[in-house]
Amino acid sequence: MTANDGHPDLEGRHILLGVTGGIAAYKSVELVRLLKKAGADVQVLMTPDAGRFITPLTLGTVSERPVLTEIFVDGDEGSWTRHISLGRWAALFVIAPATAQTLAKLAHGFSDNMLTATALAARCPLLICPAMDHDMFVHPATQKNLEVLADLGYTVMPPAYGSLASGLVGQGRLPEPESIRDAVVDMLGDRAHGESLAGQRVLVTAGPTREHIDPVRYISNPSSGKMGFALAAAAARRGADVTLVTGPTHLPTPSGVTRVDVESAEQMHSSVMEHRGADIIIMAAAVADYSPIDTSTQKMKKHDGDVALQLRRTPDILSELGARRSDDQILVGFAMETDDGLAHAREKLDEKNVDWIVLNTLTDEGAGFGVDTNRVTLISRLGEEEELPLMSKRRVAEAILDRLRFDATKPAA
């Protein structure tokens, strides 16, 4: 649902984009481009310090509107009320990146620049996207300010986890522009699918599992859970009653979704079996195939020489679901492959008794673990194969649910 495929999400919507003085300000250029591509009219507001990182000329060029930074403009007698009119004009005010300084100002009602004054006067919802170094983000003062903003009714999009400008690694990265655009669409966009899954119970699994060797070491994989979370969010937007069973992730719970946190494959198996009566089950989690036979209750000390680790097979959750499914249930599995992907995915489709397999190939650029995009091939029990182009995981989730919506063929249990 983008403007260039005939279904604009944000056609004609007025969006204010506030840009503050952080290194992540460079991402605002791409965010403006994406919002405009989706049909929005974007007005950029900048704090004075934001100009140290990205020029008003650049943002004005991509937004096709003069960037506003000052409340009072010499020679413009109407400038002193512009923050009021903008606050009424906008359907949504997005602040990305939002520095710790701006968070503090917003939380306490400061209005010393065009951005904060407009935020204080705005009648529209605010979406705030914090970005700063990890230690600044987790500081109690910042966390308290975020609590205040949430109490004021602002929507806060948590920062991403990863490499930071300081050279450290932690939570504090501005989410990618595609993710922010998707959040804007969720708040403002057309609901083209309406309540297409109203009354349906949907179970989604996401994330990795951890199979402990001892209290501090475990076997796992790099899954971020983003694909499963996108599927759960998309199903909830369509009116479904969604349960999300997830391994360890840094992701926030999607709106309208019931979340169940697990850690090991055994725990995921138990939780999935508890909820297996759902009408639609989508197994997007990267569940470990093997777990240590013996788990030490104390940290294993390092000794000279090698150590042999004996592993046992974990429960095959998808196979058990396929064997115990009801006739009217839709079951979807995922296959992450590195070679002969189609052959392995077709084999999995038959062996597991599922309706659809979603094939990921780890070697495809922009696909796989930890990224916001994906490139998948959808393979159905009826022999249909559809290769989707590289797109955001939110778009992939919508595409998958579109196929399930019209899948009236149910295999025998």
Image: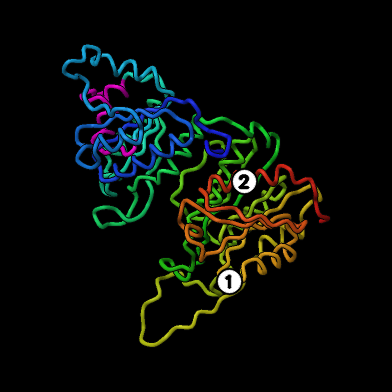
Q: Residue at x 78, y 56 (%)?
A: 382
* Residue 129 in sight: yes
Q: Find residue 214 and report its image quarter.
A: bottom left
Q: Position of residue 84 (x, y in %)?
A: 31, 16
Label 2 amino acid? Ala
User: 12 above or below 394?
Assistant: above
Q: Earlier in the sequence, mark 1 or mark 2?
A: 1
Q: Secondary structure at mark 1?
A: loop
The residue to which callout 2 is attached is: 399
Q: Quadrant of the N terminus?
A: top right
Tag of residue 339: 1
Q: Looking at the image, do the residues carrying marks 1 and 2 touch, with CB atoms under 8 Å apart?
A: no
Q: Decide if residue 165 is on the left or right side of residue 216.
A: left
Q: CA distance from mark 1 to mark 2?
A: 24 Å
Q: Identify the magenta region.
A: 96-120
Residue at (81, 56) in percent of width and height: 413
